[in-house]
Image (cartoon, helix red, strand yellow):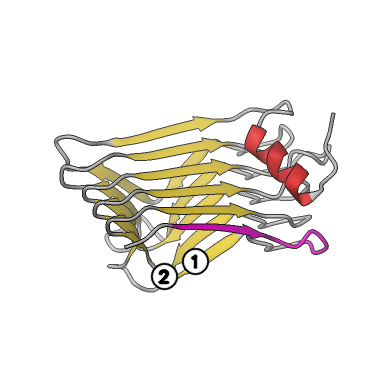
């Protein structure tokens, strides 16, 4: 058990796929201690997500789980990007990517690409997307036991174009079998900057120019 906090930042000199924190085929597990991850992207064009949790091959894997500690994940998409899929948090692939027994999981995502003065699409705050809508291929978000809830909050980015949702779930199975805890999902699609205090703070930390 233990307590961990991580902060990652992408490269502001490159265009694509500058991810704050990326975990592929790995597991985040809290068994008594708390875990906190904060990922901040900083690319200039497409696919610059704050945090990506990705699982392509293992249909039975659990990527985020807790038994008694709390897991907190915060992702901020690239502030100055001009393209698409500069998401805050991306949960993608197959299997049980998020589950909880007696601990809590909090996921907060802030979509990027809204400091550029152009129309940018698909900059969701939290994007949950499975491989297909079949057993073993969908993303499963679940609460079991008598633990705390899963709380997912997303704020869409972009400059007022399309599909900049707060939370977007595709090929996802979201369930709770707990008598005491559930799943809370809240999404905000906001178009007129400034609108995201953590995004603005991240931009200041990264030294990015800000829109008035």
Please report the residue visible at 74 percent of the width from the left and 35 percent of the height from the top. Answer: 159
Q: Name the residue nearer the viewer: 187 or 100.
A: 100
- Where are the magenta residues, as a range? 4-15
Q: How many marks?
A: 2
Residue 166 sits above or below residue 66 on the image: above
Question: What residue is drawn where x is 52% and y is 37%?
Answer: 154
Give the x, y percent position of residue 29.
Answer: 34, 61
Height in image: 165 above or below 61?
above
Left or right for 175, reference 169: left
Is residue 8 highlighted in magenta? yes
User: CA–CA distance between discs 2 and 1?
Assistant: 6 Å
Where residue 204 appears, as percent x and y from the top left, is 77, 43
- Secondary structure at numbered mark 2: loop
Residue 19, above or below 112 = below
- Rendering coords of residue 67 (x, y %): 24, 54
Name the residue carrying label 2.
26
Mark 2 neighbour class, 10 Å CA radius: few under 14, some 14 to 19, many 20 or more: some
Taking the view exactly as shown, the residue that stands out farthest to the front is: 2
Q: Residue at x 67, y 63 (%)?
A: 17
**Residue 21 is drawn in which quadrant?**
bottom right
Circles 2 and 1, Cβ within 8 Å, touching? The answer is: yes
Residue nearer the viewer, 11 or 119: 11
- Secondary-structure class at tag 1: strand
Residue marked by disc 1: 23
Q: Position of residue 40 (x, y in %)?
A: 64, 52
Question: Does residue 28 appear left or right of residue 142 in this picture?
Answer: right
Residue closest to the eye, 69 or 50: 69
Task: Give me the disc on residue 145.
Answer: none
Q: Report the side of 28 relative to 204 (left or right).
A: left
For the point 54% across and 58% down, which residue is it? Answer: 6
């Amino acid at each position: 058990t233990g307590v961990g906090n991580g902060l990652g930042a992408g490269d502001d000199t490159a265009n694509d796929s500058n991810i704050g924190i990326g975990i592929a085929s790995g597991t985040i597990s809290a068994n008594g201690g708390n875990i906190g991850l904060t990922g901040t992207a900083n690319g200039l064009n497409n696919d610059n997500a704050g945090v990506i949790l990705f699982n392509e091959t293992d249909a039975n894997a659990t990527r985020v789980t807790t038994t008694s500690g709390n897991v907190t994940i915060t992702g901020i998409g690239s502030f100055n990007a001009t393209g698409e899929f500069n998401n805050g948090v991306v949960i993608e692939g197959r299997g049980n990517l998020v589950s909880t027994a007696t601990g809590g999981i909090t996921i907060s995502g802030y979509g990027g690409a809204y400091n550029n003065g152009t129309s940018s699409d698909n900059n969701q705050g939290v994007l949950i997307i499975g491989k297909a809508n079949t057993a073993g291929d969908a993303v499963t978000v679940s609460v079991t036991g008598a633990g705390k809830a899963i709380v997912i909050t997303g704020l869409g980015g972009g400059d007022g174009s399309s599909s900049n949702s707060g939370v977007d779930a595709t090929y996802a199975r979201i369930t709770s079998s707990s008598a005491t805890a559930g799943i809370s999902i809240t999404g905000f699609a906001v178009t007129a900057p400034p609108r995201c205090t953590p995004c603005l703070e991240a931009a200041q930390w990264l030294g990015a120019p800000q829109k008035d």
